[in-house]
Image (cartoon, grey):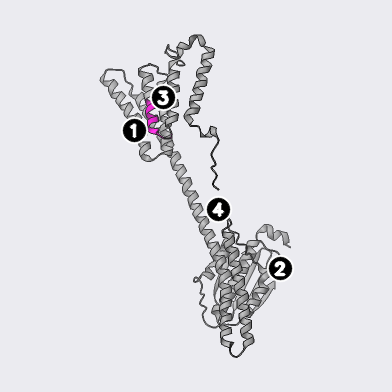
Amino acid sequence: MITDHRPPLLRRLPAGVWVAVFWTAVVVFRFFTRADELRHLFEYQGNPEDMPLVVTAVVTTLVAFLLVRLPLAAVAVALAGGIFSLGMLRAPETGPVQFLIANAVIGYCAATRSRLVSLSAVALPLTMLAWLYVWGTVNGYAVNPYAYAGLAATVLIAWLVGNTIRQGRAHAEALRGRATEQAVTAERLRIARELHDMVAHNIGIIAIQAGMGSRVMDTQPAETRTALEAIEATSRETLAGLRRMLGALRQGEGEQAPLEVTPGLVELDRLVEKAAGAGVRVALTRRGEARTLPPEVDLAAYRIVQEAVTNVVKHSGTRDCHVTVGYGPRELDVTVVDLGAGVSSATPGTGYGLAGMRERVALLNGGFSAGPRPEGGFRVAARLPIPEDAALEVGP
Protein backbone atom coordinates (compact mmCIF):
# COMPACT_ATOMS: atom_id res chain seq x y z
CA MET A 1 0.00 0.00 0.00
CA ILE A 2 1.42 3.37 -1.08
CA THR A 3 0.80 6.24 1.30
CA ASP A 4 0.96 9.88 0.29
CA HIS A 5 2.96 11.76 2.91
CA ARG A 6 1.83 15.27 2.10
CA PRO A 7 3.08 18.18 4.19
CA PRO A 8 0.58 20.18 6.28
CA LEU A 9 -1.62 22.68 4.50
CA LEU A 10 0.20 25.74 5.85
CA ARG A 11 3.52 24.39 4.50
CA ARG A 12 1.98 23.82 1.06
CA LEU A 13 0.95 27.48 0.69
CA PRO A 14 3.16 29.48 -1.71
CA ALA A 15 5.43 32.15 -0.29
CA GLY A 16 3.41 34.80 -2.09
CA VAL A 17 0.38 33.98 0.05
CA TRP A 18 2.30 34.68 3.24
CA VAL A 19 3.66 37.94 1.81
CA ALA A 20 0.15 38.99 0.81
CA VAL A 21 -1.13 38.15 4.30
CA PHE A 22 1.64 40.23 5.83
CA TRP A 23 0.89 43.30 3.73
CA THR A 24 -2.85 42.87 4.27
CA ALA A 25 -2.24 42.94 8.00
CA VAL A 26 -0.17 46.14 7.59
CA VAL A 27 -2.92 47.83 5.56
CA VAL A 28 -5.62 46.74 8.01
CA PHE A 29 -3.55 48.04 10.89
CA ARG A 30 -3.14 51.40 9.17
CA PHE A 31 -6.84 51.48 8.37
CA PHE A 32 -7.82 51.17 12.02
CA THR A 33 -5.18 53.62 13.15
CA ARG A 34 -5.78 56.23 10.40
CA ALA A 35 -9.34 55.54 9.24
CA ASP A 36 -10.04 59.21 8.62
CA GLU A 37 -6.98 59.52 6.40
CA LEU A 38 -7.31 56.31 4.33
CA ARG A 39 -6.81 58.34 1.19
CA HIS A 40 -3.14 58.73 2.13
CA LEU A 41 -2.70 55.09 1.17
CA PHE A 42 -3.42 55.93 -2.46
CA GLU A 43 -1.60 59.19 -2.99
CA TYR A 44 1.91 60.32 -2.30
CA GLN A 45 2.33 63.44 -0.11
CA GLY A 46 5.96 63.22 0.75
CA ASN A 47 5.43 60.40 3.27
CA PRO A 48 7.07 57.13 2.08
CA GLU A 49 4.56 55.11 4.11
CA ASP A 50 1.57 55.96 1.91
CA MET A 51 1.39 55.21 -1.82
CA PRO A 52 4.96 53.84 -2.00
CA LEU A 53 3.93 51.38 0.71
CA VAL A 54 1.20 50.04 -1.56
CA VAL A 55 3.64 49.77 -4.48
CA THR A 56 6.15 47.92 -2.29
CA ALA A 57 3.42 45.56 -1.08
CA VAL A 58 2.30 44.75 -4.63
CA VAL A 59 5.85 44.29 -5.90
CA THR A 60 7.00 42.04 -3.06
CA THR A 61 3.84 39.93 -3.31
CA LEU A 62 4.24 39.42 -7.07
CA VAL A 63 7.96 38.67 -6.65
CA ALA A 64 7.17 36.04 -3.99
CA PHE A 65 4.61 34.38 -6.31
CA LEU A 66 6.95 34.39 -9.33
CA LEU A 67 10.25 33.61 -7.58
CA VAL A 68 10.20 29.80 -7.76
CA ARG A 69 8.75 29.21 -11.21
CA LEU A 70 9.58 32.43 -13.08
CA PRO A 71 12.61 34.04 -11.39
CA LEU A 72 13.43 36.26 -14.38
CA ALA A 73 9.89 37.63 -14.32
CA ALA A 74 10.35 38.31 -10.60
CA VAL A 75 13.47 40.37 -11.38
CA ALA A 76 11.58 42.27 -14.06
CA VAL A 77 8.67 43.03 -11.68
CA ALA A 78 11.04 44.36 -9.01
CA LEU A 79 12.82 46.58 -11.54
CA ALA A 80 9.51 47.82 -12.94
CA GLY A 81 8.42 48.72 -9.42
CA GLY A 82 11.61 50.70 -8.93
CA ILE A 83 11.18 52.61 -12.20
CA PHE A 84 7.52 53.30 -11.35
CA SER A 85 8.45 54.61 -7.91
CA LEU A 86 11.14 56.91 -9.27
CA GLY A 87 9.33 58.02 -12.42
CA MET A 88 5.60 58.12 -11.69
CA LEU A 89 5.60 58.54 -7.92
CA ARG A 90 8.88 60.43 -7.72
CA ALA A 91 9.64 58.63 -4.49
CA PRO A 92 13.40 58.30 -4.19
CA GLU A 93 12.96 56.38 -0.93
CA THR A 94 11.16 53.46 -2.60
CA GLY A 95 13.16 52.98 -5.81
CA PRO A 96 16.29 51.63 -4.08
CA VAL A 97 14.13 49.26 -2.02
CA GLN A 98 12.71 47.74 -5.20
CA PHE A 99 16.20 47.55 -6.64
CA LEU A 100 17.43 45.68 -3.55
CA ILE A 101 14.53 43.25 -3.95
CA ALA A 102 15.72 42.65 -7.52
CA ASN A 103 19.24 42.04 -6.18
CA ALA A 104 17.88 39.48 -3.72
CA VAL A 105 16.19 37.63 -6.57
CA ILE A 106 19.44 37.74 -8.57
CA GLY A 107 21.31 36.17 -5.64
CA TYR A 108 18.61 33.51 -5.42
CA CYS A 109 18.95 32.75 -9.15
CA ALA A 110 22.74 32.51 -8.88
CA ALA A 111 22.44 30.11 -5.92
CA THR A 112 19.68 27.83 -7.21
CA ARG A 113 19.30 28.17 -10.97
CA SER A 114 21.41 27.35 -14.01
CA ARG A 115 24.21 29.61 -15.15
CA LEU A 116 22.13 30.80 -18.12
CA VAL A 117 19.24 31.89 -15.90
CA SER A 118 21.49 33.61 -13.36
CA LEU A 119 23.42 35.51 -16.05
CA SER A 120 20.13 36.55 -17.66
CA ALA A 121 18.96 37.83 -14.28
CA VAL A 122 22.14 39.92 -13.97
CA ALA A 123 21.74 41.28 -17.49
CA LEU A 124 18.27 42.72 -16.77
CA PRO A 125 19.25 45.35 -14.14
CA LEU A 126 22.57 46.12 -15.80
CA THR A 127 20.79 46.77 -19.10
CA MET A 128 18.22 48.92 -17.32
CA LEU A 129 20.92 50.98 -15.58
CA ALA A 130 22.81 51.47 -18.84
CA TRP A 131 19.62 52.57 -20.61
CA LEU A 132 18.67 54.99 -17.83
CA TYR A 133 22.17 56.47 -17.80
CA VAL A 134 22.21 57.00 -21.56
CA TRP A 135 18.61 58.31 -21.59
CA GLY A 136 19.30 60.76 -18.79
CA THR A 137 22.51 61.97 -20.41
CA VAL A 138 20.88 62.47 -23.81
CA ASN A 139 17.91 64.37 -22.33
CA GLY A 140 20.09 66.68 -20.25
CA TYR A 141 19.27 65.34 -16.81
CA ALA A 142 21.82 65.56 -14.01
CA VAL A 143 23.17 62.01 -14.03
CA ASN A 144 25.55 60.87 -11.32
CA PRO A 145 27.75 58.12 -12.82
CA TYR A 146 28.96 57.06 -9.37
CA ALA A 147 25.41 56.30 -8.27
CA TYR A 148 24.84 54.11 -11.32
CA ALA A 149 28.19 52.41 -10.80
CA GLY A 150 27.28 51.74 -7.17
CA LEU A 151 23.96 50.18 -8.16
CA ALA A 152 25.71 48.04 -10.78
CA ALA A 153 28.21 46.96 -8.11
CA THR A 154 25.35 45.81 -5.83
CA VAL A 155 24.02 43.67 -8.70
CA LEU A 156 27.40 42.00 -9.20
CA ILE A 157 27.87 41.51 -5.46
CA ALA A 158 24.45 39.86 -5.18
CA TRP A 159 25.34 37.50 -8.05
CA LEU A 160 28.74 36.69 -6.54
CA VAL A 161 27.18 35.89 -3.16
CA GLY A 162 24.63 33.60 -4.75
CA ASN A 163 27.25 31.95 -6.94
CA THR A 164 29.45 31.35 -3.90
CA ILE A 165 26.55 29.65 -2.14
CA ARG A 166 25.95 27.53 -5.24
CA GLN A 167 29.61 26.47 -5.43
CA GLY A 168 29.69 25.67 -1.72
CA ARG A 169 26.60 23.50 -2.08
CA ALA A 170 28.06 21.75 -5.12
CA HIS A 171 31.31 21.13 -3.27
CA ALA A 172 29.46 19.70 -0.27
CA GLU A 173 27.41 17.42 -2.54
CA ALA A 174 30.60 16.26 -4.26
CA LEU A 175 32.15 15.46 -0.88
CA ARG A 176 29.03 13.58 0.20
CA GLY A 177 29.02 11.66 -3.07
CA ARG A 178 32.70 10.79 -2.69
CA ALA A 179 32.15 9.70 0.90
CA THR A 180 29.19 7.57 -0.16
CA GLU A 181 31.22 6.01 -2.94
CA GLN A 182 34.06 5.23 -0.54
CA ALA A 183 31.62 3.73 1.96
CA VAL A 184 30.06 1.57 -0.76
CA THR A 185 33.49 0.43 -1.91
CA ALA A 186 34.56 -0.39 1.63
CA GLU A 187 31.36 -2.34 2.24
CA ARG A 188 31.78 -4.22 -1.04
CA LEU A 189 35.33 -5.16 -0.12
CA ARG A 190 34.22 -6.22 3.34
CA ILE A 191 31.54 -8.50 1.91
CA ALA A 192 34.01 -9.85 -0.66
CA ARG A 193 36.50 -10.69 2.09
CA GLU A 194 33.89 -12.46 4.18
CA LEU A 195 32.57 -14.36 1.18
CA HIS A 196 36.03 -15.39 0.04
CA ASP A 197 37.22 -16.44 3.48
CA MET A 198 34.10 -18.44 4.20
CA VAL A 199 33.56 -20.09 0.82
CA ALA A 200 37.15 -20.58 -0.33
CA HIS A 201 38.11 -22.43 2.84
CA ASN A 202 35.11 -24.76 2.77
CA ILE A 203 35.31 -25.40 -0.97
CA GLY A 204 39.01 -26.20 -0.57
CA ILE A 205 38.16 -28.75 2.12
CA ILE A 206 35.44 -30.24 -0.09
CA ALA A 207 37.84 -30.52 -3.03
CA ILE A 208 40.45 -32.30 -0.92
CA GLN A 209 37.90 -34.69 0.56
CA ALA A 210 36.44 -35.45 -2.87
CA GLY A 211 39.90 -36.20 -4.22
CA MET A 212 40.69 -38.50 -1.30
CA GLY A 213 37.37 -40.29 -1.66
CA SER A 214 37.81 -40.90 -5.37
CA ARG A 215 41.29 -42.38 -4.83
CA VAL A 216 40.28 -44.86 -2.13
CA MET A 217 36.77 -45.59 -3.34
CA ASP A 218 37.58 -49.15 -4.46
CA THR A 219 40.10 -50.13 -1.82
CA GLN A 220 38.88 -48.35 1.36
CA PRO A 221 35.09 -47.93 1.41
CA ALA A 222 35.15 -46.73 5.02
CA GLU A 223 37.50 -43.85 4.17
CA THR A 224 35.30 -42.99 1.20
CA ARG A 225 32.25 -42.87 3.47
CA THR A 226 34.12 -40.60 5.89
CA ALA A 227 35.12 -38.27 3.07
CA LEU A 228 31.54 -38.10 1.79
CA GLU A 229 30.24 -37.31 5.27
CA ALA A 230 32.81 -34.53 5.60
CA ILE A 231 31.79 -33.18 2.19
CA GLU A 232 28.13 -33.21 3.20
CA ALA A 233 28.77 -31.46 6.52
CA THR A 234 31.02 -28.83 4.99
CA SER A 235 28.57 -28.19 2.14
CA ARG A 236 25.69 -27.70 4.56
CA GLU A 237 27.78 -25.33 6.62
CA THR A 238 28.71 -23.32 3.55
CA LEU A 239 25.09 -23.11 2.36
CA ALA A 240 23.94 -22.02 5.82
CA GLY A 241 26.58 -19.31 5.89
CA LEU A 242 25.59 -18.07 2.45
CA ARG A 243 21.93 -17.95 3.44
CA ARG A 244 22.74 -15.93 6.56
CA MET A 245 24.89 -13.56 4.54
CA LEU A 246 22.25 -13.01 1.84
CA GLY A 247 19.56 -12.58 4.48
CA ALA A 248 21.62 -9.93 6.22
CA LEU A 249 22.21 -8.10 2.94
CA ARG A 250 18.46 -8.01 2.26
CA GLN A 251 17.45 -6.72 5.68
CA GLY A 252 17.57 -3.05 4.77
CA GLU A 253 19.16 -0.39 2.65
CA GLY A 254 21.56 2.26 3.94
CA GLU A 255 22.74 0.06 6.81
CA GLN A 256 25.91 -1.95 7.05
CA ALA A 257 25.15 -5.61 6.58
CA PRO A 258 26.10 -7.44 9.79
CA LEU A 259 26.74 -10.67 7.86
CA GLU A 260 25.89 -12.50 11.15
CA VAL A 261 28.72 -15.01 10.69
CA THR A 262 31.35 -13.67 13.09
CA PRO A 263 33.62 -16.50 14.20
CA GLY A 264 36.59 -15.95 16.46
CA LEU A 265 39.69 -17.60 17.84
CA VAL A 266 37.60 -19.84 20.11
CA GLU A 267 36.77 -21.85 16.97
CA LEU A 268 40.39 -22.59 16.09
CA ASP A 269 40.12 -26.12 17.49
CA ARG A 270 37.24 -26.82 15.12
CA LEU A 271 39.26 -25.37 12.26
CA VAL A 272 42.11 -27.71 13.16
CA GLU A 273 39.74 -30.68 13.07
CA LYS A 274 38.45 -29.71 9.61
CA ALA A 275 41.98 -29.34 8.30
CA ALA A 276 42.85 -32.75 9.75
CA GLY A 277 39.89 -34.19 7.89
CA ALA A 278 41.42 -32.81 4.69
CA GLY A 279 44.72 -34.53 5.47
CA VAL A 280 46.65 -31.57 6.94
CA ARG A 281 47.90 -31.77 10.51
CA VAL A 282 47.78 -28.38 12.21
CA ALA A 283 49.79 -27.82 15.38
CA LEU A 284 48.16 -25.06 17.40
CA THR A 285 50.15 -23.13 20.02
CA ARG A 286 48.71 -20.41 22.23
CA ARG A 287 51.06 -18.08 24.06
CA GLY A 288 50.13 -15.64 26.75
CA GLU A 289 46.83 -15.43 28.57
CA ALA A 290 43.91 -16.11 26.24
CA ARG A 291 41.17 -13.54 26.77
CA THR A 292 38.18 -11.93 25.13
CA LEU A 293 39.22 -9.68 22.27
CA PRO A 294 37.39 -6.86 20.49
CA PRO A 295 35.12 -8.42 17.83
CA GLU A 296 36.97 -6.87 14.89
CA VAL A 297 40.35 -8.15 16.14
CA ASP A 298 38.96 -11.59 16.97
CA LEU A 299 37.35 -11.97 13.55
CA ALA A 300 40.40 -10.71 11.65
CA ALA A 301 42.72 -13.10 13.52
CA TYR A 302 40.46 -16.08 12.85
CA ARG A 303 40.09 -15.23 9.16
CA ILE A 304 43.87 -14.87 8.76
CA VAL A 305 44.45 -18.30 10.27
CA GLN A 306 41.62 -19.78 8.21
CA GLU A 307 42.93 -18.39 4.93
CA ALA A 308 46.52 -19.37 5.70
CA VAL A 309 45.48 -22.93 6.53
CA THR A 310 43.38 -23.03 3.37
CA ASN A 311 46.45 -22.06 1.35
CA VAL A 312 48.37 -24.84 3.04
CA VAL A 313 45.66 -27.36 2.14
CA LYS A 314 45.44 -26.18 -1.47
CA HIS A 315 48.92 -25.06 -2.45
CA SER A 316 51.75 -26.06 -0.13
CA GLY A 317 52.05 -29.75 -0.96
CA THR A 318 52.66 -30.57 2.72
CA ARG A 319 50.58 -32.26 5.39
CA ASP A 320 51.89 -30.22 8.32
CA CYS A 321 51.67 -26.62 9.44
CA HIS A 322 52.09 -24.74 12.70
CA VAL A 323 49.75 -22.00 13.94
CA THR A 324 50.89 -19.74 16.77
CA VAL A 325 48.62 -17.23 18.50
CA GLY A 326 50.37 -14.89 20.93
CA TYR A 327 48.35 -12.73 23.33
CA GLY A 328 50.35 -9.66 24.21
CA PRO A 329 49.34 -6.78 26.50
CA ARG A 330 48.81 -4.41 23.57
CA GLU A 331 48.73 -6.62 20.48
CA LEU A 332 47.85 -10.04 19.15
CA ASP A 333 50.44 -11.95 17.08
CA VAL A 334 49.30 -14.59 14.62
CA THR A 335 51.78 -16.77 12.71
CA VAL A 336 51.14 -19.66 10.34
CA VAL A 337 54.13 -21.64 9.06
CA ASP A 338 54.16 -24.65 6.76
CA LEU A 339 57.03 -26.88 5.74
CA GLY A 340 55.94 -27.36 2.17
CA ALA A 341 58.49 -28.00 -0.50
CA GLY A 342 58.67 -25.77 -3.54
CA VAL A 343 57.20 -22.32 -4.14
CA SER A 344 53.70 -21.61 -2.94
CA SER A 345 51.33 -20.51 -5.62
CA ALA A 346 49.99 -17.91 -3.25
CA THR A 347 53.00 -15.68 -3.63
CA PRO A 348 52.87 -12.26 -2.00
CA GLY A 349 50.86 -9.68 -3.85
CA THR A 350 48.80 -12.18 -5.87
CA GLY A 351 45.50 -13.84 -5.20
CA TYR A 352 42.53 -12.59 -3.21
CA GLY A 353 43.46 -14.52 -0.07
CA LEU A 354 46.66 -12.65 0.75
CA ALA A 355 45.11 -9.38 -0.42
CA GLY A 356 42.16 -9.93 1.91
CA MET A 357 44.46 -10.70 4.85
CA ARG A 358 46.54 -7.61 4.14
CA GLU A 359 43.38 -5.46 3.96
CA ARG A 360 42.07 -6.81 7.25
CA VAL A 361 45.32 -6.02 9.01
CA ALA A 362 45.57 -2.57 7.41
CA LEU A 363 42.07 -1.67 8.59
CA LEU A 364 43.20 -2.38 12.15
CA ASN A 365 46.49 -0.45 11.70
CA GLY A 366 48.50 -3.60 12.19
CA GLY A 367 51.47 -5.20 10.47
CA PHE A 368 51.39 -8.05 7.96
CA SER A 369 53.99 -10.11 6.11
CA ALA A 370 53.79 -13.22 3.96
CA GLY A 371 56.35 -15.02 1.85
CA PRO A 372 58.59 -18.08 1.40
CA ARG A 373 61.01 -18.91 4.19
CA PRO A 374 64.75 -19.30 3.47
CA GLU A 375 64.71 -22.79 4.97
CA GLY A 376 61.69 -23.80 2.93
CA GLY A 377 57.96 -23.54 3.25
CA PHE A 378 55.78 -20.46 3.61
CA ARG A 379 55.14 -18.08 6.49
CA VAL A 380 52.23 -15.74 7.18
CA ALA A 381 52.54 -13.35 10.12
CA ALA A 382 50.21 -10.63 11.38
CA ARG A 383 50.37 -8.29 14.33
CA LEU A 384 47.02 -6.84 15.33
CA PRO A 385 46.98 -3.98 17.84
CA ILE A 386 44.43 -4.21 20.63
CA PRO A 387 42.65 -0.92 21.42
CA GLU A 388 43.93 0.65 24.60
CA ASP A 389 40.60 0.56 26.42
CA ALA A 390 40.20 -3.15 25.66
CA ALA A 391 43.78 -3.85 26.66
CA LEU A 392 43.40 -2.00 29.95
CA GLU A 393 40.45 -4.15 30.93
CA VAL A 394 42.66 -7.22 31.12
CA GLY A 395 46.08 -5.59 31.32
CA PRO A 396 48.64 -6.50 33.94
What label does residue 72 carry, if any? none
Real-space Cα distance between discs 3 and 2? 78 Å
Q: Residue at x 25, y 21 (%)?
A: 138
Question: In the rendered view, does 79 fall on the left or right side of 38?
Answer: left
> Label 2 is placed on what type of residue?
Ala
Question: Measured along the vertical axis of the image, is residue 224 above or below residue 242?
Answer: below
| Disc with the residue nearer the chain's start (1 vs 3) | 3
Q: Residue at x 43, y 23 (%)?
A: 58
Look at mark 4 in the image and give the residue it sits on. Answer: 254
In magenta segment, residue 48:
no
Give the x, y percent position of residue 147: 36, 24
In magenta segment, residue 69:
yes
Look at mark 1 in the image and give the residue it sits on. Answer: 123
Toward the front, the furthest residue is 1
Range of magenta residues: 68-79
Toward the left, the furthest residue is 138
Give the x, y percent position of residue 265: 66, 69
Q: Residue at x 35, y 35 (%)?
A: 120
Look at mark 2 in the image and give the residue it sits on. Answer: 290
Look at mark 3 in the image and give the residue it sits on. Answer: 98
| Disc with the residue nearer the chain's start (4 vs 1) | 1
Question: Measured along the vertical axis of the image, is residue 183 above or below residue 100?
Answer: below
Real-space Cα distance between discs 4 and 2? 37 Å
| Disc with the residue nearer the chain's start (4 vs 2) | 4
Mark 3 vs 2: CB contact within 8 A: no
